[in-house]
Amino acid sequence: MTTIEEANKLLQKECGVRDFFSCDSELLQIAEELNSTYAYVACESNAEYGDFQTNQKLANQVTEKLKNNGFSPQVVVEPTCGKGHFILSVLNTFAEVEKIFGIEIQKRHFWQAKFNVLDFYINNPDKKKPEIHIVNSNIFDYNYQTIKNSIGEKELLIIGNPPWVTNSELSAMDSKNLPQKSNFKQHKGLDAMTGKGNFDIAEYITIELLRNFGHNKGNMAFLVKNTVIKNIVYDIPRLKLPIANLKKQNIDAKKEFGVSVDAALFSCQLNQDTECYCQESNFYTSEIKCNFGWNNNKFMSVLSADNDIDGISPFVWRQGIKHDCSKVMELEYDGNSYCNKLGEHFSLEDKLVYPLLKSSDLKTTIANPTRKMTIVTQKFVGQDTSYIKQYPQTFEYLNNHIDLFQMRKSSIYKGKCNFSIFGIGDYSFKPYKIAISGLYKTFHFCLVKPQNNKPVMLDDTCYFIGFDTLEQAEYIWNLLNTDIVENLLKSISFSDAKRMITKDILMRIDLKKLAKIKGDKTCFWDNIEKCQKSQLSLFN
């Protein structure tokens, strides 16, 4: 009877795969594993793994492009190898390869990769057979030391298509396919608990591999979302990654993967003097678009662009109100009663109800009368909300929906008062505001005036600065809606970002420099600074 050792020896001779079967029981289980295609889809969600398998044609195009660029690896690592399409492309493209390491968490893909390699050599018996290790493991638990011991001075290629999913998306699915809990982005305070604490799993994997293998001779080539590449380039100075010759080659993700996501092939050379910029081009035509990255300690989306007002804003740009309970908090008024998104009609005291603007309302030069209203439960973050009892109708309405408030998933609400909100402060109640949408790919600033003797609130998709007088607001508004500001924003924002406009970007508009360039009177500017003292003191 053939032993497991004999079977593995034969299979390694035929296809190069080491330890094809790890134990006798696998021989009995393999038929069930390979025939579980439809049951697998039902019981194990591909979304949990951010699983977008690279088609064989694209994998072949990637390896051919790498070969044409002079890549000649001896050791290849694919950290999330899926069904093995990149491994097959490597076998077909690089004759110098001596060892291949593939890691895959999903058992079915793990077996399919092995049998795909076996099938490759059945059809190509004369092809060179490197030593191939395909491991069923979670990449977050994998010990890279075995691979490190195999590399030495050999040319390394790290290649693949890591998961296209964020840690928050996986957490929402109660996924176990997550790295160990940590403040990976090293943000502080509220940033660590909200949007800035979120990150792509592919970004985590890429940086971990660069940390582990950055000082080895070789290259990396990953298919990832554009935001991942931007974030990695942004973090290079902080992480001191020893990489250079960074390239971002844009692909058509809709055609290749059937998803509407901006993605690209990211490649870089390892063990180099650090370069903090990246060349962007078209994957299919090789047409170069631009370089982006760091220049004179400033992060730019177009490195060739110069702008005299790229500095620090004298005013603090604020994000609008965050409540994560729009079904209850966002209202419409028909002249007789309020109505929420649940279709309920009710009466409220007017005291805590304010007009509300969302991103879609900021397309005009001057904001139109608002379509919606919102309940503002606090005047500053952390305020005790028990005072709302003095407004019986409002308190009863909110209390009737307390279950929806308690279902809010963000950690920022844990341990806070009932009906807590964020993005609220003295600045929220300034009568005049200049606002811009964070979601739309435009650089248009909208002037917002009070309505019915109340300041207008904005939701958390918007950014704004507030003023005490219309004269002050109009002065700054006219400065912001100039070509020089638009040119700056074009050179520091990324059109494929989920939010093209952010607070960090807006805080780089040095309006005082702009005022000097425009030749405006210093005394008028000084008067504005005096009136904005509360904002300036918070910033400084």
Image: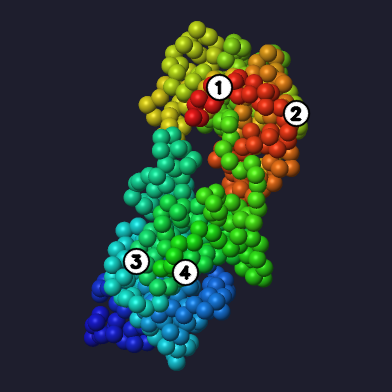
Indicate which disc residue 118 carries.
Answer: none
Indicate which disc residue 269 carries.
Answer: 4
> In the rendering, at what x and y percent does residue 76 appear?
41, 74
Residue at image point 34% right, 77% down: 153
> In the rendering, at what x and y percent does residue 459 appear?
59, 30
On-image quarter of the N terminus: bottom left
Three-letter code for the amino acid on which mark 4 is drawn = Gln
Q: Is residue 294 above or below residue 396?
A: below
Whichever of labels 2 and 3 marks the residue nearer the N terminus, that label is 3
Q: Is residue 204 above or below residue 328?
A: below
Contact between labelled residues 1 and 2, with CB atoms less than 8 Å apart: no
Judge from the rendering whether residue 485 lies leftward or rightward of residue 423; answer left or right.
Answer: right
Whichever of labels 1 and 4 marks the residue nearer the N terminus, that label is 4
Of residues 284 and 489, the one drawn nearer to the viewer in this rendering: 489
Residue at image point 52% right, 79% down: 70
Whichever of labels 2 and 4 marks the residue nearer the N terminus, that label is 4
Q: Quadrant of residue 128?
A: bottom left
The kind of secondary structure element at disc 2 is: loop
